[in-house]
Amino acid sequence: MQSVLVVVAQASQPSVMPQSIAQSEDYFSFFELPRRFGQDLDSLEASFYRLSRVYHPDRFTASSLEAKAVSLQKMSFLNQAYSTLKSSLLLRDYLLRLEGVDMNAVKSTLPVKMAETWFELQELAMESEGSLEVLGEKLSDFQVELVELQKATEENLKFLETQYDSQQDRSILERLAGEVQVSNYLQSLAKAVPQLLKKWRY
């Protein structure tokens, strides 16, 4: 838990001196929250505004240069923490990093069928005699299947997050990291489809 403020007496008029961010501080501890994926966004927002009032630089205009610098540091950290924790995607990546899960070392099972189909579509697009209508139909079918697979992957991610919040088991985080890799791969495919069609047309 963090110590929010330290009161320092100076002459006849006391000033408020915020503490620097400890090296062990993370976004969760800064908000005094447990390390979990499921967060109450209303409570998070309320805490953000409360801490903003505590650390805002306007409160330290008459304070020392050190106090002003620490105030700016705190506000910057607060904004970064809030932006991360209120986003399910950013929170997911942050918590995995915070728990030391190496994405490169985690085994994932990429959808082989989708990869093979995508390779075939690229080959079809490179054929000079290829039909735009045929390519368009195949890409349309591919996109439908891709969207369904993305939905299923996101459901798996949410399930694993809920499971981790209740069990705090590291093996769940490793499985989650594998699903994140699958999700990232599918997202890259979703971005590549319109680019392929545009390239083929022109």
Image (cartoon, grey):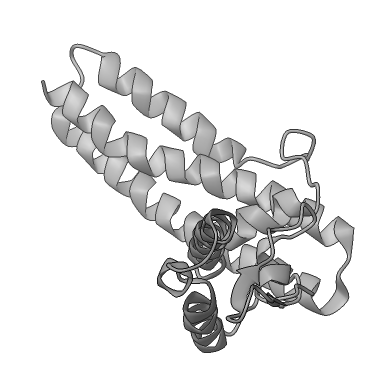
Viewer-closest of 123 and 196: 196
Residue occupying image coordinates x 62% and y 59%: 92
Residue 150 placement, left or right of 167 = left
Q: Which of 140 and 171 is in front in this view?
A: 171
Image quadrant containing the C terminus: top left
Asked whether 169 or 35 is in front, the reply is 35
Locate residue 197: give its quadrant. Answer: top left
Q: Which residue is drawn at 34% across and 40% down?
A: 191
In percent of width and height, residue 71 lies at: 54, 63
Residue 104 relative to residue 157: left or right: right
At x 28%, y 15%, the residue is 126
Report x, y in % for residue 128: 19, 11
**Relative height, residue 136 to residue 50 (above, below):** above
Q: Which of 169 and 28 is in front in this view?
A: 28
Q: In this view, does 178 lie above or below 46?
A: above
Which quarter of the rendered picture does the N terminus lie within?
A: bottom right
Position of residue 64 measured from the top left corner of the image (x, y, whole percent): 55, 60
Q: Residue furthest left?
A: 202
